[in-house]
């Protein structure tokens, strides 16, 4: 619907597991973002990639590891997560002509539950 | 520090009545302001943005927002609410530091439109 897809839509994992979230954008954009949406808290920006280079790492714990192999794909690799990491993880993309004014378009999110 | 406030957790409106969802901001310099809507189990959908120009911005689904510099507000409005407008609404301001595209979101306001 928005041109940004995320898989899986739901993920349940144990604290010792390793998993990856995938995001793909079909909009021809050059910037991609990961956000975390927790209950009762504002959305938090985690990472920003512009032309496949990371331009923002918002003090995110190292158990979250992003990867941007090309401008259409963005991954979030997860390992040894904590229960408080349970949240909706949203991917977004923007055109990247000007990050300040660009509109970001969001995917549907991955609902992550850490047991 | 730049911030956004949505003073109401929930707004209740009868179908056909006008609706307003409030947003105030605090930024240094000229603000870039955005409204997004989130339906249950979905990602965020872009509604409208203010970058420069006319203070009244028209967006998707009949929504509009008025930028008021003296009151540092960017309230979302619609002349006639629909039941299908019921959703979670987020106001956001672009963080102008570092030009990373970072959006700072408010807490969100749940809009409930009753038939």
Image (cartoon, coloured by chain):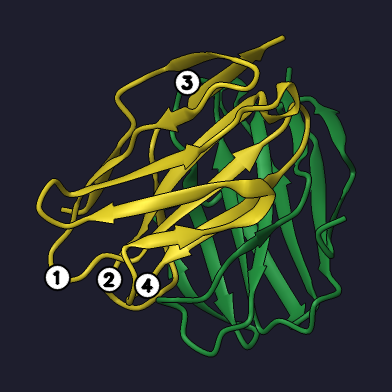
Quadrant of the drawing holding the C terminus of chain B: top right
What distance separates the C-alpha of mark 3 from that of mark 2?
25 Å
- Residue matched to label 4: B51
On whether disc 3 and disc 2 are found on a single subunit, the reply is no
Per the image, label 4 sits on a secondary structure element best described as loop
Discs 1/3, front:
1
On whether disc 4 and disc 1 are found on a single subunit, the reply is yes
Chain for colour yellow: B
Please give left or right for residue B24 compared with residue A108 in the image.
left
Circle nearer the N terminus (4, 2) = 4
Which chain does tag 1 point to? B
On whether disc 4 and disc 3 are found on a single subunit, the reply is no
In the image, which disc is placed on residue B29? 1
What distance separates the C-alpha of mark 1 from that of mark 3?
29 Å
Residue A60 place in picture, x, y as percent = 46, 51
Discs 4/2, front:
4
In the rendered structure, are the residues bearing label 2 and label 1 in contact, judged by CB atoms less than 8 Å apart? yes
The crowding category of the residue bearing disc 2, from other C-alpha atoms within 10 Å (few below 14, some 14 to 19, many at least 20), is many
Discs 2/1, front:
1
């Amino acid at each position: 619907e928005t041109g940004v897809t995320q898989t899986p839509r739901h993920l349940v994992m144990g604290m010792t597991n390793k998993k990856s979230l995938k995001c793909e954008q079909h909009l021809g954009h050059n910037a991609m973002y990961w956000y975390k949406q927790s209950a009762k808290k504002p959305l938090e920006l985690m990472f920003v990639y512009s032309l496949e280079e990371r331009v923002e790492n918002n003090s995110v714990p190292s158990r979250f590891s992003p990867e941007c192999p090309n401008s259409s794909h963005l991954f979030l690799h997860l390992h040894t997560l904590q229960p408080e990491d349970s949240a909706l993880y949203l991917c977004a993309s923007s055109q990247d002509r000007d990050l300040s004014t660009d509109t970001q378009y969001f995917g549907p999110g991955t609902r992550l539950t850490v047991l | 520090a730049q911030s956004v406030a949505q003073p109401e957790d929930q707004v209740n409106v009868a179908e056909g009545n006008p609706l307003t969802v409030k947003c105030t901001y605090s930024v240094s310099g000229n603000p870039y302001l955005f409204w997004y809507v989130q339906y249950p189990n979905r990602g965020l959908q872009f509604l409208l943005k203010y970058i420069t120009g006319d203070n009244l911005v028209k967006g998707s689904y009949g929504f509009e927002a008025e930028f008021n510099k003296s009151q540092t507000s960017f309230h979302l409005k619609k002349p006639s609410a629909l039941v299908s407008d019921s959703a979670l609404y987020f106001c956001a301001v672009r963080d102008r530091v570092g030009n990373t595209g970072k959006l700072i979101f408010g807490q969100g306001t749940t809009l409930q439109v009753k038939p």
